[in-house]
Image: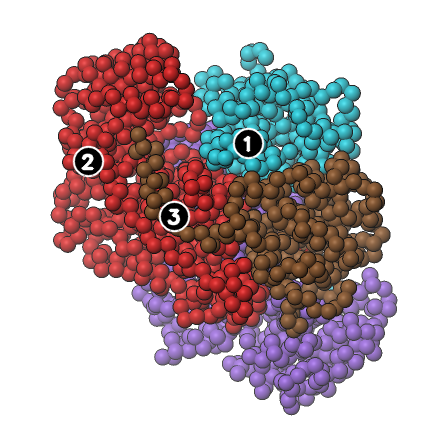
Chain colours: A cyan, B brown, C purple, D red
Amino acid sequence: MDNRQNRFDMPSDTDVAWCPGCGNHMLLKAVKGALDELGIDPGSLVMVSGIGQAAKAPQYMKVNMFNGLHGRALPAAFGIRLSNRELVVVVESGDGDMYGEGGNHFLHAIRRNFDVTLIVHDNMVYGLTKGQASPTTQRCMKTPVQVGGVILEPFNPLAVAIALDAPFVARAYAGDVKQTISLIKKAISFKGFALVDVFQPCVVFNKLNTWQWFKENTYSIAADHDPTDRMAAIKLATATGKFPLGMLYRNDNRALYEDLAGIGEKPLHQQQAPDEKDFRAMLDSIPMNNH
Amino acid sequence: MDNRQNRFDMPSDTDVAWCPGCGNHMLLKAVKGALDELGIDPGSLVMVSGIGQAAKAPQYMKVNMFNGLHGRALPAAFGIRLSNRELVVVVESGDGDMYGEGGNHFLHAIRRNFDVTLIVHDNMVYGLTKGQASPTTQRCMKTPVQVGGVILEPFNPLAVAIALDAPFVARAYAGDVKQTISLIKKAISFKGFALVDVFQPCVVFNKLNTWQWFKENTYSIAADHDPTDRMAAIKLATATGKFPLGMLYRNDNRALYEDLAGIGEKPLHQQQAPDEKDFRAMLDSIPMNNH
Amino acid sequence: MRPYPDDISLVIEGAAGQGVQTITAALLPILNNSGYNVFSCMEYMSRIRGGRNSTEIRITGKIRRAFTAHIDVLFALSPHAFEHLQNRIDEKTLIFAEKEQFGNGWNERCIDTPIAKFAIQAGGPVYSNTVAAGAVLGILGIPLEPLNIFLREQFAIKGDEAVENNIKAATLGYDFGLLTPPALKSKIPLPSTNDGESHLLMDGNTALGIGAIAAGCNFICSYPMSPGTGLLSFLAERSGTFGIVVDQAEDEIAAINAGLGASYAGARAVVTTSGGGFDLMQEGMSLAGMIETPIVVHIGQRPGPATGLPTRTEQGDLDLALHAGHGDFARAIFAPGTLEETIATMQQAFDLAQRFQIPVIVLTDQYLLDAVSTIDVLDIKRLPVASTIVRTDEKYKRYAFTDDGLSPRGVPGYGDGLVRVDSDEHDEQGLITESFDMRSRMMEKRLKRLQPLAEEAFPPTVIGRHDGAEIMIVCWGSTRGVLEEALDILDSKRLAGIHFSQVYPLNPSILAMLRNRRIIVIENNARGQFADLLTHETGLGISRRILKATGEPFSVEEVVDALQEEAHG
Amino acid sequence: MRPYPDDISLVIEGAAGQGVQTITAALLPILNNSGYNVFSCMEYMSRIRGGRNSTEIRITGKIRRAFTAHIDVLFALSPHAFEHLQNRIDEKTLIFAEKEQFGNGWNERCIDTPIAKFAIQAGGPVYSNTVAAGAVLGILGIPLEPLNIFLREQFAIKGDEAVENNIKAATLGYDFGLLTPPALKSKIPLPSTNDGESHLLMDGNTALGIGAIAAGCNFICSYPMSPGTGLLSFLAERSGTFGIVVDQAEDEIAAINAGLGASYAGARAVVTTSGGGFDLMQEGMSLAGMIETPIVVHIGQRPGPATGLPTRTEQGDLDLALHAGHGDFARAIFAPGTLEETIATMQQAFDLAQRFQIPVIVLTDQYLLDAVSTIDVLDIKRLPVASTIVRTDEKYKRYAFTDDGLSPRGVPGYGDGLVRVDSDEHDEQGLITESFDMRSRMMEKRLKRLQPLAEEAFPPTVIGRHDGAEIMIVCWGSTRGVLEEALDILDSKRLAGIHFSQVYPLNPSILAMLRNRRIIVIENNARGQFADLLTHETGLGISRRILKATGEPFSVEEVVDALQEEAHG
Ligand SMILES: Cc1ncc(C[n+]2csc(CCOP(=O)(O)OP(=O)(O)O)c2C)c(N)n1
Ligand SMILES: Cc1ncc(C[n+]2csc(CCOP(=O)(O)OP(=O)(O)O)c2C)c(N)n1
Ligand code: SF4
Ligand code: SF4
Ligand SMILES: [Mg+2]
Ligand SMILES: [Mg+2]
């Protein structure tokens, strides 16, 4: 990771609200690095997020930004993308934001398969609200609310995504900036719904899943894994033990929502009001009057 | 299917709001049949539902009933079950109710694994609101809203459930009352979250997935399928072509929420207010005062 | 007892699935084209087949747009007719029904009508509704041919046999209808002088859709919910022609957030729902207020709380609309009472939303949305659709401070600037701030628009003669028609009406209209939500509230009764 | 400029993560046990580390519970102190800080305090906060030993070395503090006569939790949201002892629906959230109204709209609470202003919810929840927890009509009857109905309880002397303390205060209290939501609104200033 400026950098005096040592810093670098390397124009990119520590990421990039409600980044991203196909839309979200409050949108965004990249900062905890369990918190971790330890089965975003035939499903680790950049680049280049769930240590509230822990409990997916093999992918995603890093699943055969829905190339903001002819024709065609 | 009375029958003059010929009638018979055969006492059973045609089912049974909000049956069922472990809790819901509006609760109820049976009347359409696409509507079906035909990938409830390791996942067809009864009986007897997604023809709004269609497009799962084999189950659930009927997946090793959370046997309504001793002790232990 | 003689109310009763809607769709245009004034409204149960449903068709001398309780002619298709409608029929009601299934209510005013027999003669029981349609024309003495044309068009796709059977059914019914005792026929009003051509027939849903299209609406994402779904279907059907992006959301939360995303990116977005769905959009409303992003929300009201009565009518969501979303921010709320107002307020809603960068709500209800009446094409006016979007430059700040609190609105990808919106309190650039000073300035900025919004508010419409009236009867939304008719009937100089098609903010001119008069508010809810609002905004006291929250609209008779004493006392 | 001399305000400033909370937790009990009256409140940014945060500790002669803007003694741990707090310090403020990092604001009143140096001497930079705590005691001339005891308990789990280092740090700070110029020390008030023993120190969160436990609360399902989360954590920690079922929901919608399910089954359920989360609970509120099922909802208010200022304070959700949920139904809303009231209203909330079978809201805010003050144990009163649940028999009907509209409430599995609740309009048995008559009767049934609810409403508390006061200053919720103190300072016979700890419905007695006086309302929001409510409920006009919506609470000085003219003519 080098520190040279890239075109998505904010002014150097920007106050970043993340804790020192947090995985978010490296992930931010990776996201900006990927965007820069792809040569994307900041003006044609919209970063969308919800609320949480992760969701602050777009605040620290020089981009168009829709920092909406907790859990609601994906619907907003969908509205943005459909209104202007020229825009590159990237969502950054936390594990609570996306898989907790936003779980329903996660499911249905996958079904839609519009062109969006979803980067989830998966720190296995609610950071901003001070350490409660998130959907991905591992069993038995104690928190101020889960005083006896977490008893729910962790949410498995990769398995669910593959079960719904999400066309691009990857997992990265913020500690490996190179791989993270590479996966994010692929995800953004991919036309369709692309999920990159990124393990991101929260050094304040998650004392279980530390930098060290992630290092020890992850492995790179073997080179011979065929990401187009859905069953193999889901096997990787559901296996117990260490967590696989890399590209789990890819399906290039799913059609894009925008294409199926016939969304035109012209942004909606450039659309004129209906002309008088069409408008009158519509009036004439109102069922009770057209016979 | 015989017409003899069972203990869950409503008075014979009960006005049933379902259309003649609808699959709901047979499914209702099956549910009542299963309950009766299990010898469950109506007074210890609570049927919970949301809103929709399916969700009216509990209205037509002599049971305790919580007919709540559209999409919100599972959280209500959860609250009921935790408040009284003596109650048998069964949710009846539609495909829209459960997988659309209620999608997030579906995910997280599976993670919780409390003891509930979820019967989804899956007619692949929004019945009560007059024929819009539901999450399970098949591609290309035209509706008053999906005027060019449905373009979203259908939601795959079974695959998602298995991906989340739901411990009991089955599919039935309302046209086969015997199998439906048998699966529902197993589901209710199962201690934990049990999903039975039941294909149910909507004869008014779904002209694609008719009685005939379901007959032709389903098959019984082979006897040699091992429901404890998660990969085999997910393969069945995600395969293209005909839909498998029967028991897809079963995992008897997941612990029950109630047990993990230490929910006592005594219903909460019988709990006394805290006694004075405990209350004073709590006051004394308030952090700023106990040193 | 009918308070006036120059019109008739015809009610067709039938279970869901018996085709009452098809009859209505056939008869209304025929009556309209024949030069009659027509108004129609319907009431139906929340079920797809069966149940107790009815449609009222009024054929009137003057243009009327209100529900009357009394039924002059009842056409009964189901066995539930008498039980269901007995309160609305009396000894003068002419009843066409099959004696056998009509039951207890049968007496000499009933005409045994062999609907089923004719239907079977024509080809089968499904033709009952066509028999009825034919019979109605016969009763009214209107030529059959237009109905035959309708049937040919309607059933063409079902093949020749279906068409022929329908025509046969219509003819059998027609011939029967012609034999109706002449005593009734004299009640039919003369055709009005309006020629049917320039008058379009439509329901409120259609008007709402026309308004949205006129306003250049090009994005709708919504979740089905009666009676809000109509707008979604209307726009879906026309999405191709007008380039409207239409998506059915997974839930209402997704719907409004998608709408806001779209609007942020430059779409003219609308969301439609009913009270329960709108509950789920509250946080989105608050977001719209915070990020100053236009959105139009249509709420088709129905009786609550909770699921309530899904297919019935009420005006019970005004309070909710007024206070939806936590925190303080500006909004506007419309509540049209006629087709014309529906088209106009919908356009105004889009216009205000764009210009003031706020959420705007249009409140209708089941009664208004389903009621069919006529509108002169010339009264369908289009507001110019001005784009309020600016091309940004490099120094662009989304929330730049300005004198009026309105910052030029850019959209991403259009110009050299960046467009940043934030649900947290933010600075001019749209970035998170925790400066108390910035917070204060931003709150002030967001609320400043309330004043000009009030000044631009649609003034209410006076019904009758304002000068000299001691008592002002105030109504809003769908109750306009019934008050108009009641005041017309009561014909009292002491009373005048005022109808609000915009209910928030209120135009400051209303104070002068209402001051020093007794104020009576009539509304279709349990406690008088608009009455409260009126007092809140004007400080004026309300002397009486005429309320109804049964799930039904007010009938003309009820309102006449309620005001009788005030009018003549 | 401090308006009164007998107390001091000590502010400890530090970035998140610097341990200011630990200092406060250590100092407050020591001060309390030493017989001082203390009050403390905090303000902090929405971040976990860094930023500009501060805690005020007031040591007062009289019991006070309000924020004062002026700082007498500032203890600065971060480099942002001056920039952040400059408006609150003046030439009289004694500042303890490290000269090097304090920056521009440095002058002769500042005492260069080698915090970092001492910390490193003690073992490392993490001990800075302990140095500060020791120094504060030294400055105040209070013995060090209690702090050492606290440190031993607190750090025992971290091992002997941590304990020893902390004690060393405290001692270094203490010795330094002892050298403070005597001029300041004279300002410290004499210990009050209350002995610390019977006075418990706690924050609003704790009081809320105590109230819930006293009320027999045994179910909470909620989704974290500041500042509502505290109640969830409090009950979670005590769930074992009191048999409370605690679940963290996937979202707020699940939370309230689980709460209603639980309540239906007989639990005494509460839900906690903040405005944005409450937006999502609106439909659940409406459901509670429809199914007549008790639920208590706590809303910890923070500034909106949308995400707003997550860790700041405001009273902006009253309007929302009043109108939450579509349709008309009964509710009650509390807004405590003191610890005592917090404990009492929470119990009353549960009691009313159970007896009237309605949703009840308790409105607090960040300021109230985080503020620490003292309460006499004798003032912690327990309301009897009466069970309102009946054993059902075979003929049981959940919605049986009764004179007062309240049907005996059964729960499933208890008795021989069936308990059916339905979000649709329903009949006495709880089954769907579409009868207009049944609808009307059920609406009436549900709304009938409004009257007795008003009669049982907590009357407001008079602050000062009511008789003779020409001007009534009205406040509600967390603004009680600041108004009390301001009126005390202003000491004017013309003014009296009224504080509402129940804001809806209002007790009918208030009319007599307010009539014929000038009314001024003070509230922590942008437009005066309670002022509107008061006018709505009483018809009385409000002559002035004193408002603040910056995200900060009112300071005593501000309120004194605002009322100065009214007080003295
Ligand atoms: C409707 C709503 N509910 C709750 C919150 C409070 N909240 C803010 S962030 C957050 C959780 C954040 O967790 P995650 O998404 O994992 O982000 P992290 O802070 O861990 O990066 C919550 C519960 C909110 N802002 N809005
Ligand atoms: C919050 C909310 N949104 C929407 C609705 C309207 N609504 C009622 S039932 C239904 C869909 C029902 O579909 P499904 O669950 O599949 O049941 P079906 O009628 O097909 O059995 C909808 C959208 C509602 N009642 N509440
Ligand atoms: S709280 Fe955790 S996730 Fe948030 S910034 Fe700090 S370390 Fe990172
Ligand atoms: S609409 Fe469809 S699902 Fe509903 S009752 Fe009729 S046939 Fe059944
Ligand atoms: Mg997280
Ligand atoms: Mg369905």
What chain is tagged by disc 1? A
Q: How many marks?
A: 3
- Mark 1–mark 3 Cα distance, whole angstroms, equals 28 Å
Q: Identify the image quadrant of residue A235.
A: top right
Image coordinates of residue D326 in percent, x first then y, are 49, 55
What chain is tagged by disc 2? D
Element under disc 1: loop
Badge 1 amino acid: Cys
- Mark 2–mark 3 Cα distance, whole angstroms, equals 28 Å
Is B252 displayed left or right of C465 in the figure? right
Q: Identify the image quadrant of residue C375.
A: bottom right
- The residue that mark 2 highlights is D195
- The residue that mark 1 highlights is A140
Element under disc 2: loop
Between B67 and D391, the one nearer to me in the picture: D391
- The residue that mark 3 highlights is B274
Between A256 and B85, the one nearer to me in the picture: B85
Is C290 displayed left or right of C436 in the figure? right
Image coordinates of residue C39 in percent, x first then y, are 60, 70
**At 58% from the left edge and 20% from the top edge, which residue is drawn?**
A213
Labels 2 and 3 within one chain: no
* D159 over A53 or under it: above or below: above
Badge 2 amino acid: Asp
- Mark 1–mark 2 Cα distance, whole angstroms, equals 43 Å
Quarter of the image with the N terminus of chain D is top left
Task: Name the mark on residue C543.
Answer: none
**At 45% from the left edge and 65% from the top edge, which residue is drawn?**
D408
